Image: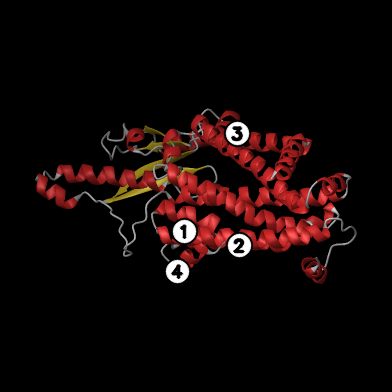
Amino acid sequence: MQDILTVTKFTMRDMLGRKSFRISTIIIIVLIVLGFNVPNILQAIGSDSIEDKVLIADPENIYEDQLKNLNELCPVNTCGELSTTTDNLDTAKQQVIDGKIDSAVIISKTDQNLHFNYLVKNAATSGQPPETLLNLLEKIYLNSQITKLNLSDKALASISPEITIEISQTDEAEISGNIFTMMLLSIVLFYAIYFCAFQVSSSITTEKTSKIMETLVTSTSPSSIVLGKTIGIGIIGLLQMVLFVATALISARLFLDPEIVNTLIDVSHLTIGLGLITILYFILGYFAYAFGYALTGSTVSKPEDVQSANTPVALLAAVSFYLAYFTLTDPTSNLNVFAAIFPFSSPFCMPIRMMMGLASPLEICLSLVILAITILIIAHIAIRIYSNAILHYGTKMSWKEIWQNYKAK
């Protein structure tokens, strides 16, 4: 146990001492902060307002001065910055040419039909007029005409009923939670597990080319080296991911609209128990892939060969992630249940099923047991092969040589 702790401390100091690790961490933090500041940056380098300036011209006063409060009636960021006028088409056209406005809607009436002339500088690049604005103009005109009919309240209610929408499902299971938050959690778990585990094979291969390996071999057992490295890199990786997530959450609160943040990132279904289970799945998922990468890293002695050696494990990780990710579209399907129990996809899938309220205690226990057994099997194979290939130098080992190293005493 003491040897494992020694290797763990050595690995952590080595990871933190690497200039590339510190620089990459700082760059990612800066990119996260800048990413959440994109709307503010665009607004700062652009005009005073990022909304298009749209002029609503009613030269015939068809709306009878009912367009004065149009900006208040139109939802934010859907219609642009609106202004109204009684100017004619020629005057509005000149304002577009001069750049005072981006577009204009000229209202006219033929018989009983309304006509909207959407005026822009270049129709090929400007596209269609805002649908929300056109719907609002139509609704205002309709309401004004209905009011002139002096209908009773009951008749008005029958013409303009209040519409409510309720979403229901045929499955008996109750699915709750924000699907965006769940998918975001799945993506974060995947990248955390994948990149942390990848560091194990890179570290093992790199140390083969230095004198560190000979020192480690003479002072401790190969199994202690594998376990110590895996634990050390895992701790640093977990702390790094906590730092990234904390930076993202703080940046979102500081730089984005609170309503948007609360809508997209709904954490109302996150509990302490779910948080602890998610961390447990992260740790177990990391160990499953880390031991796999330790196995592939021990079969090569050149850093440039690490990528090709890691291909089988990388493909397994990608397939498992997409299996969990895409089955979220139908979380009550048997395929999603399989993804939650299959050991290589369960770290990405089971926490999401738990957040949705779909995972039964039996499924959770079965998933954890299978994942733990899988880790023990992979760890045994990885340590066995690593012990026999620890001083292997030269070309990448073939599958036949890997099998021979596993069987060798």
Which tag is nearer the camera, tag 3 or tag 4?
Answer: 4
To which residue does mark 1 refer? 365
Q: Tell me the crowding category of disc 2: few under 14, some 14 to 19, or many 20 or more residues within 10 angstroms, Cα based.
A: some
Q: Whole-Å distance between the Cαs marked 2 and 1?
A: 14 Å
Q: What amino acid is found at the position of numbered circle 3 in the picture?
A: Val
Q: Tell me the crowding category of disc 1: few under 14, some 14 to 19, or many 20 or more residues within 10 angstroms, Cα based.
A: few
The mark found on residue 334 in the picture is 4
Q: Quadrant of residue 20?
A: top right
**Split into 4 quadrants, where in the image is the C terminus?**
bottom right
Q: Tell me the crowding category of disc 3: few under 14, some 14 to 19, or many 20 or more residues within 10 angstroms, Cα based.
A: some
Q: What amino acid is found at the position of numbered circle 1 in the picture?
A: Cys
Q: Earlier in the sequence, mark 2 or mark 1?
A: 1
Establish if 265 lies above or below 397: above
Secondary element at image label 1: helix
The mark found on residue 374 in the picture is 2
187 vs 126, nearest the viewer: 187
In-image side of 5 versus 55 (left or right) = right
Which tag is nearer the camera, tag 2 or tag 4?
Answer: 2
Q: Residue furthest bottom?
A: 400
The answer to whether marks 3 and 1 mark residues whose Cβ atoms lie closer than 8 Å is no
The mark found on residue 33 in the picture is 3
Secondary element at image label 3: helix
Q: Whole-Å distance between the Cαs marked 3 and 1?
A: 39 Å
Secondary element at image label 2: helix
Q: Earlier in the sequence, mark 1 or mark 4?
A: 4
350 vs 104, nearest the viewer: 350
Q: Earlier in the sequence, mark 3 or mark 1?
A: 3
Q: Whole-Å distance between the Cαs marked 1 and 4?
A: 18 Å
